[in-house]
Every structure is written in structure tokens, then in C-alpha cells.
Image (tube, rainbow, N blue to C red):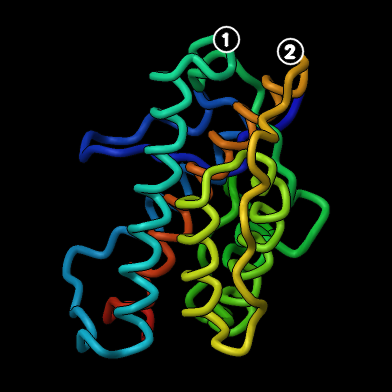
Amino acid sequence: MAQRGDSDTGGRAAPPSAATLPRALLPALCLALALSPPVRAMPPPSSPLAERMNRSRELLAAASASIHRLKELGTLGFECTLEEVDLEDITKDKTNTIKSCLSQDPGTGNCPALERSTFDTSKCLQAIYEDLNAYRAELRNLGDQKVLTTIDEMMTALNPMGRSAVQALPGAVPTSFQERMRLCSILHAFRIRTITIGRMMSYLTSPESSL
């Protein structure tokens, strides 16, 4: 079964005990706790950090809208809810946000955490770029130009000298049930990863990131 590497815990309620969580969800809990500073100092509107923050919000909105659109149109032939699929992390064997932005040594705890003393901003941002590149390749067949455009804009904000924009392949939504299930899984995994990316951008604009 594919892991759910990162997730959106949402809300302000006290988090559940790590002992009660599936192992695959533990990185998500750590990330949510690590990236929730009480006060944020927003960067100037024209700064690279501000642009990345805005692009990360657009990423989440585009990913959510794409899933909603598939449900409304009945394109996949099923609801495509998070509960229906085992999430496939297409970045698990590559440099990715979870590996590069969080400590991989849980120590005496149960999950990885953001180590401010060893946090490498450049490495983390590069990993986010690589994640987006991987998802862009997978989602090209979806035919959703809005998703591809927001991915490209975020990648450009991270690396202005990066690749040129990718065009969607028209009418290429998969036809077999297994392929449609995989597309649903990847879309949900992408949405969850955009939440993680947004939290990283939020952390990088906070005073805590410079401590």
C-alpha cells in the first residue's frame, strides 16, 4: 500500500497522540506542529518570498479545483474521494520535500521534525522544485491546463531560469479503471503535497525561520 507521506491536519484542536496514528501519517503531524509559528511577519509584496507564498496558495487552489471538477463532471466514473484511494507518492524514491525539509532521524520520538539548527533553505527549495517537476510530468495527461500553469508559475518563482511552460495533452484522461484510480490517487497526493509546500513557504516568511 502506498504511503500518505504528508497531510493536512487542519484546525486548531489538540493533535492526536502519535501512538494512535498510522505510521504513514506521522510525518504530517510533525510538519503541522513544526510549521505553525504564532506570529508571521509577511515579506514585502514584491519580494521573491511573497511571490512564492502566493504561488503556493494558487497551487493548492488549482489542485483542489481539479479534483472538484473531475467529481462534478463524473470524468473518472467514481467519486474520487481521499478515502477511496491509496495515495501514491511518486516522489518517494527521489529528492523530495519531506526528505529535504525535515530531519530523517526521529531520535527518541516517533516521527521526523523540522530541525531549525540544520535547516537548509536552498536544499528544501530545490526539493520542492523537484517535487513539482515530477507532478508536472504525471499530470500532463490530465488535460488540466490550470494545474500545469500554476505548477509552472511556482517553479519559475523558485527558479527563474527553469524550464518553459508545459502544455496539457488534450483528451488524454486515462480510460481503464486502474489508470483512473491512479490519476485520482496522484491528484490527491499532489493536493496534500501543495499543503506541505504552502506550510514551508509560510515557515520561510516567519521570524522563526531565522532563529
Residue at x 56% of width, y 76% of height: 125
Say above or below: 183 vs 82. Answer: below
Along the line of sight, the residue nearer the viewer: 193 or 160: 160
| Disc 1 to disc 2, C-alpha distance | 9 Å
Which residue is nearer to you in this view: 6 or 159? 159
Q: Is residue 87 left or right of residue 53?
A: right
Give coordinates of residue 3: x percent, y percent.
69, 33
In percent of width and height, residue 67 lies at: 46, 31
Q: Quadrant of residue 205?
A: bottom left
List the single residue furthest toward the front: 170
Q: Which residue is mark 1?
A: 77
Query: As drawn, is 121 to the left or to the right of 202?
Result: right
Mark 2: few/some/many CA within 10 Å (<14, 14-19, 20+) = few
Q: Picture coordinates of residue 145 (x, y %)?
A: 51, 51
**CB of mark 1 within 8 Å of CB of mark 2?**
yes
Give the residue at x 53% y 44%: 144
Q: Secondary structure at mark 2?
A: helix
Q: Position of residue 95 (x, y in %)?
A: 75, 64
Picture quarter with the C terminus = bottom left
Mark 1: few/some/many CA within 10 Å (<14, 14-19, 20+) = few
Label of residue 170 in the image: none
Residue 179 vertical position relative to residue 139 in the rendered view, above or below: above
Badge 1 amino acid: Gly
Identify the disc placed on residue 177.
Answer: 2
